[in-house]
């Protein structure tokens, strides 16, 4: 019913992308996996967000919610343990399992310092995809965000192959990470793990989870909308192909675009208005 990272991590890739329906347990179960891993092996993890404001909201509940582990406590996990979030002097956070540090909260936008974290064996990048059509939210580094992530990764990994789990909702297949790694999946199949030499991608859509959601008034009220296709159908609603078509015989060439080594012509048919 819920997403878990176990199967995907068996592929032993360093970049593991999960694009899943909203509310399907991506963050919850990935953090739960990281805590259990620390409990068993002592391996620490990093919880990464894009900007400091996102990290603050997740870790301390600045918008009125609980901290990063509030849902896990609420569901009854680790009742005899203390899971605690403590701010550090660098603007990040330390995560404690009783009195032991089990992980760190970092923001990609402010992670400039070289920090040795030799016990970290897992990175969780939450909400790596964004809706960059709404004006105020943008990828970092003028869109070349994976350059910043790679720099952050190498600072942590120091030559080790540490798996990263990227968690996101379906906004656009055209994003800095898929472009950099040349990940192209034209018609994604639900719950299939796609694998490259260094990466995996899973488009997760739990049928039992969706069956439960269908009993809610909100699902019924929105089921015919673009939001429902995005939130519950994993439809990348920012991606369009309706402007790509065979040109008419009367169309006139306007200009060409060169993108990722390919040349695309832009033609206009003034009679058809297309």
Image: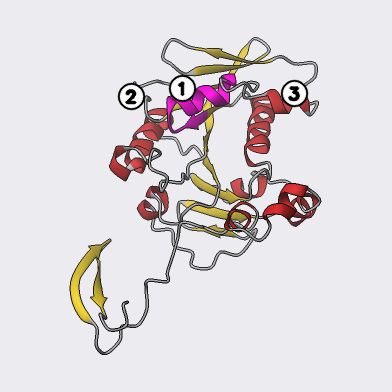
**Quadrant of the image occupied by residue 71:** top right
Q: Position of residue 65 (x, y in %)?
A: 64, 23
Left or right of 76 in this view: 226: left
Give neighbour class at mark 2: few <14, some 14-19, many 20+ (Cα, 10 Å).
Answer: few
Q: Position of residue 258 (x, y in %)?
A: 22, 64
Residue 114 versus residue 48 in the image, above or below = above
Badges 3 and 2: C-beta atoms under 8 Å apart? no
The local secondary structure at tag 1 comes to loop
- Residue ID at (28%, 61%): 260
Left or right of 149 in this view: 256: left
The front one of 75 and 165 is 75
Looking at the rendering, the stretch of residues picked out in magenta corresponds to: 47-61
The front one of 45 and 58 is 58
The reply to whether the magenta stretch includes residue 8 is: no
- Residue ID at (49%, 52%): 171
Q: Mark 1 — residue?
A: 117
- Which of pointers 3 and 1 lies earlier in the amino acid sequence? 3
Q: Mark 3 — residue?
A: 73
Badges 2 and 1: C-beta atoms under 8 Å apart? no
- Residue ID at (37%, 71%): 243
The reply to whether the magenta stretch includes residue 57 is: yes
Main SS of the magenta segment?
helix
Q: Mark 2 — residue?
A: 112
How far apart, in angstroms, are the residues tagged by discs 2 and 1?
A: 14 Å
Residue 106 versus residue 11 in the image, above or below = above
């Amino acid at each position: 019913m819920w997403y878990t990272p176990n199967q995907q991590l068996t592929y032993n890739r360093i970049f593991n992308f999960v694009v899943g329906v909203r509310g399907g347990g991506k963050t919850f179960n990935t953090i739960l996996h990281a805590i259990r891993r620390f409990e068993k092996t002592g391996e620490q993890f990093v919880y990464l967000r894009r900007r400091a404001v996102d990290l603050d909201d997740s870790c301390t509940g600045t918008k009125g919610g609980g901290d990063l582990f509030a849902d896990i406590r609420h569901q009854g996990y680790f009742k005899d343990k203390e899971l605690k979030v403590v701010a550090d002097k660098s603007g990040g956070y330390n995560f404690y399992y009783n009195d032991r540090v089990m992980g760190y909260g970092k923001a990609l936008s402010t992670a400039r310092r070289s920090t040795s974290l030799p016990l970290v064996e897992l990175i969780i990048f939450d909400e790596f995809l964004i809706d960059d059509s709404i004006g105020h939210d943008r990828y970092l580094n003028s869109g070349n965000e994976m350059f910043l992530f790679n720099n952050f990764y190498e600072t942590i990994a120091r030559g080790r192959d540490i798996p990263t789990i990227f968690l996101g909702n379906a906004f656009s297949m055209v994003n800095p990470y898929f472009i950099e790694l040349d990940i192209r999946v034209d018609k994604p199949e639900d719950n299939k793990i796609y694998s490259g030499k260094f990466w995996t991608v899973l488009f997760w859509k739990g049928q039992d989870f969706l069956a439960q959601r269908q009993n809610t008034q909100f699902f019924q009220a929105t089921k015919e909308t673009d939001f429902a296709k995005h939130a519950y159908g994993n439809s990348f609603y920012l991606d369009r192909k309706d402007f790509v078509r065979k040109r008419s015989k009367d169309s006139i060439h306007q200009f060409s675009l060169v993108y990722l080594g390919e040349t695309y012509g832009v033609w206009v048919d003034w009679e058809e208005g297309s």
